[in-house]
């Protein structure tokens, strides 16, 4: 997704209450729908990786993880590993 934004040259302003609108061309290209979830992962102090999870997939993942207690460090490590694989897969 980072590649798509750079390629398209889209700029989005952070509005009141920190609302960000995804550009239409990006929404269409990546088939983002109302109710989908955007997971923001920090890459550096000023960069984020945005991963789109369809609403049904996000709910399924949440359900699988309910009742599982992880330390903050373990959760962050698992999230980084998952989204690193997702980013590599999206870059193909």
Image (tube, rainbow, N blue to C red):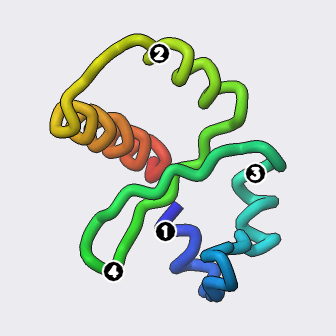
**Mark 4 highlights which residue?**
46
Badge 2 or badge 4: first in the primary sequence: 4
**Mark 1 highlights which residue?**
3
Q: Residue at x 25, y 41 (%)?
A: 76
Q: Which-is-in-front pick, marks 3 and 2? A: 2
In whole angstroms, how far apart are the C-alphas of marks 1 and 4?
A: 16 Å
Q: Are marks 3 and 2 in contact (CB under 8 Å)?
A: no
Image x and y of residue 33, in percent: 81, 48
In whole angstroms, how far apart are the C-alphas of marks 4 and 3?
A: 24 Å
Q: Which-is-in-front pick, marks 3 and 1? A: 3
Nearest the viewer among 35 and 2 is: 35
| Image side of residue 27 versus residue 4, left or right | right
In whole angstroms, how far apart are the C-alphas of marks 2 and 4?
A: 31 Å
**Mark 3 highlights which residue?**
32
Numbered disc 1: secondary structure: helix
Nearest the viewer among 66 and 40 is: 66
Residue 66: mark: 2
């Amino acid at each position: 997704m980072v590649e798509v934004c750079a390629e398209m040259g889209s700029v989005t302003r952070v509005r009141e209450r920190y609302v960000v609108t995804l550009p239409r061309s990006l929404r269409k290209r990546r088939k983002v729908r109302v109710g989908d979830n955007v997971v923001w992962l920090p890459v550096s102090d000023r960069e984020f990786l945005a991963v789109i999870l369809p609403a049904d997939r996000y709910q399924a993942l949440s359900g699988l993880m309910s009742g599982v207690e992880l330390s903050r460090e373990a959760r962050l490590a698992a999230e980084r590993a998952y989204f690193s694989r997702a980013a590599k897969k999206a870059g193909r």
